[in-house]
Image (spheres, rainbow, N blue to C red):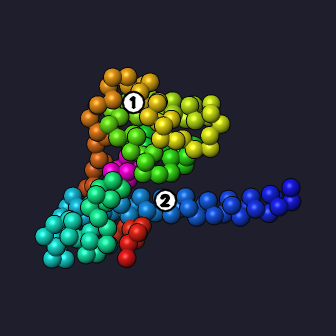
Amino acid sequence: MSAMNTVAPSLQQLEDVVRKGFEEGMKGWKALRIIQAQDLYKSKGYSDFKQYLMGEWDVQLNYAEKMIAAASVREKLESKLTGDPDLHKIKTERQLREFRGVPDGKLKDVYERAAVIATDKGAKTISSPAIRKAKEEVLGSQTTAPAIQEPSTAGTESNDPVIAGAK
């Protein structure tokens, strides 16, 4: 049992680092979304966003699009669920992807239902399958609703922290 006591604080510290890295990564992807939306990459001589991603960050467009969408969803969740103590349980692009297509007015309902499903199973995170199931339960046949709209980028600086996975 004493080994558990010495491991737990270390694990908690490492998980805090991972969580901060995820949050910082989301800031980086948000910055990339702004760079793309405002065509800022052109000032460096790139003719398109794909070339910019490869030339500056060694990132494929498909991956960047997934992560940029995840950052948008994360931002939307944070605005709808301000102060929710369990929001940290949404940790991956895969989890965030499940929230795409959820109408703004139903986002909190889907999240809360997913949290209940996860808690009922004794899970420490809110898994993608739990979110998918909650989405089906809350939205029913509405699961093809319009995607979550991206928050406005007006007045947002484009020099956010270094993008995760950058050179």
Is residue 58 shown to the viewer in this render? yes
Which residue is pictured at 33% across the width and 59% down the height?
A: 63
Residue sitting at x 56%, y 31%: 117
Quadrant location, the C terminus: bottom left
Q: Earlier in the sequence, mark 2 or mark 1?
A: 2
Q: Pinpoint residue 80: horizontal percent, then vertical percent.
A: 43, 39
Residue position for label 2: 22
155 or 50: nearer the eye?
50
Image point 29% across, 47% down: which residue? Answer: 150
Q: Which secondary structure class fits the magenta region best?
A: helix
**The one of 87 and 59 positioned closer to us in this rendering:** 59
Kindly report the distance in space between the C-alpha atoms of the residues bearing marks 2 and 1: 25 Å
The magenta segment: 69-75
Q: Is residue 86 left or right of residue 103?
A: right
Q: Amino acid at mark 1?
A: Lys
Q: Given contact means CB atoms under 8 Å apart, are the residues at marks 2 and 1 in contact? A: no
Q: Based on the displayed image, in which of its 4 quarters is residue 44 positioned? A: bottom left
Q: Secondary structure at mark 2?
A: helix
Q: Which mark is residue 137?
A: none
Q: Which numbered tag is attached to residue 106?
A: 1
The image quarter containing residue 55 is bottom left
Q: Residue 66 magenta-drawn? A: no
